[in-house]
Amino acid sequence: MRRYAAAMTDPVLTDAWWREAVFYQIYPRSFADANGDGVGDLEGIRSHLVDLVELGVDALWLSPFYRSPMADFGYDISDHCDVDPIFGDLAAFDALLAEAHGLGLRVVIDWVPNHTSDQHPWFLDAASSRHSARRDWYVWRDGPTDGAPPNNWVAAFDLTAPAWSRDPRTEQWYLHLFDPAQPDLNWDEPAVVEAMHDVLRFWLDRGVDGFRADVLHTIGKSPELPDDPPEVAGIPHCALNDVPVTHDRVRAIRSLIDSYGDDRVLVGEIYLTTTEAIASYYGEGDEVHLAFNFPALYAPWSAERWRSSIAETEATLGARGAWPTWVLSNHDNPRHRTRYDEAAARRGEDTDTRARRSEARARTAAVLLLTLRGTPFLYQGEELGLTDAPIPPESALDPGGRDGCRAPLPWDASPGHGWPSGANGPWLPLPPDSEIRHRAAQQDDPGSILHLYRRLLRLRRSTPALRRGDLELLDAPDGVLALRRSLDGEIRIVLINTTDLGVDLPSALAPVGWQVLLASDDPEPPAAVPLRLGPDQALILGP
Ligand code: GLC
């Protein structure tokens, strides 16, 4: 048994709202379409805020809605301080923020510090001449004489492509860790730091509750831009870039945010592969408040793998007094229901078994996500149990192949399920099963996964032990994950069966006289703790 306690290093931050909040990620293009043009918008989000309050989340993270040519669907920004007309305008943002705050929801927005669009006036200016006053705002290099790029870094999205493009006009290469339409800013240039800090101030002054900082670990680069070692050939440089100077820059960003008081949050997307590397960006409590825990997102649906991921997260972050986060899905990865199902297919599960297990697994995963120690991030649509939309290669839009998880949310029984139908349909096809899985249908069905998320969020909110209690990994039969959460004498046991076999429960996991407070598969489970955990079932027990 391993026990993990909340590290109490800072009396102010242990009370911080973001430690107990449940975040809900909105990908604005695909959330809700108020003006019927087939692309979601800020007004669509505003009109559904009450649904999110009813769901029971505390904070929203909005993916980019800024002016953008949309080469990376908004992560290529051409004006950081304006709303792209496809999403609305600044007045629509202010209205959304005010209404969210009025409903008690916090709003965190995406901030993309590593790169801009190649259509940003800064880049247009920088690229216009080697002597442009903004030339050094981006990273320009001469290549070797053989026509090769300046180093061997690989760009994200197209792993066969270099992270450099040659600009024929000024005959130099510019760096882009992502798409060629996303040139990297040069954070060695003080004017860039000031300009990007000004962007933070612009939105903090408007009242946002914080930022999700996009690939924050990439804003510092090794000054010599050395080749990546041959053993990591084919891994994009953005997943490898990890240099000390970045920490100074993150500390400066944190101080700026702290200058607005202690209730704004900095969430880092630190897209590195180990928990240890990610944890270092919490600094000494002076860098990010929270960082996404990607190794857990990539963990397969296996009790043993999750057990070790939880133990590693707790040990690594605990050593720093850092607060964990948990996430299963986002706009960059296949949805977890899809991932777990594809893994089942690879294991040889037949179609009927997969169909039966898929939703049950999504439900047990929800129980796990919302009972771990740390801040959970939900991705829009997981509360509906959505799977990815299959997108044939000839219809792909995203340079990174991520269209499937970005399929629009089905809202109701109308022909377009809340989106325009027919020839002018939504920007991406709706997810499979939209006719039975839309929100309105689930709203009317207490047995739906939507109601499970609501029950879970209600239980979490009313149970201090689940929000901020210690966590202990209990010994459990194979395939079962057992957690004990406790705070000031309040104790809960969480049991997650990741297999499709019933499992007899040892008495330590089914204390006599305890009750079932929540079951993943039944809105009104029998109160008495059963002797056996059902296949793909999760239970929360309390005295
Ligand atoms: C982050 C975003 C991703 C984007 C990339 C470049 O990883 O989550 O969607 O493509 O950064 O901005």
Image (tube, grey):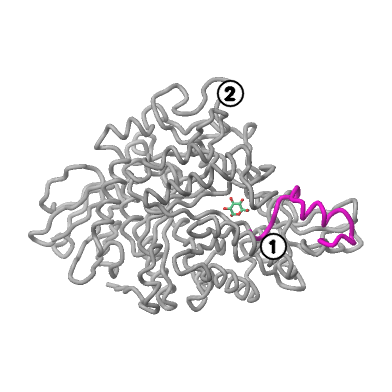
Label placed on residue 195: 1
Given residues 474 and 400, the one toward you in this image is: 400
Please give left or right for residue 183 compared with residue 132 in the image: left
Please give left or right for residue 162 compared with residue 85 in the image: right
Relative image position of residue 497 (x, y in whole percent):
28, 53
Is residue 76 highlighted in magenta?
no
Mark 2, Cα crowd under 10 Å, few <14 / some 14-19 / many 20+, is few
Viewport quadrant of the C terminus = bottom left
Which residue occupies 47% across, 33% down?
Answer: 431
* Vertical placement of residue 319 versus 415, above or below: below
- Name the secondary structure under disc 1: helix
Instruction: Examine the residues drawn in magenta and state their main secondary structure.
Output: loop
Please give left or right for residue 384 compared with residue 427 in the image: left
Given residues 474 and 329, the one toward you in this image is: 329
Tell me the quarter of the picture where residue 163 sits: bottom right
- Would you name the residue on which mark 2 appears? 424
Which residue occupies 45% across, 69% down?
Answer: 262
Tell me the quarter of the picture where residue 475 sits: bottom left
User: Upstream in the sequence, badge 2 or badge 1?
Assistant: 1
Q: Residue furthest left?
A: 513
Relative image position of residue 53 (x, y in whole percent):
35, 46
Give the alpha-carbon distance from disc 2 to disc 1, as whole Å: 39 Å
Q: Which residues are magenta?
A: 113-134
Q: Nearer the viewer, mark 2 or mark 1?
A: 1
Within 8 Å of ligand 1, the CB of disc 2? no
Q: Amino acid at mark 2?
A: Asn
Q: Would you say residue 187 is visible in this rendering?
A: yes
Tell me the quarter of the picture where residue 513 sits: bottom left
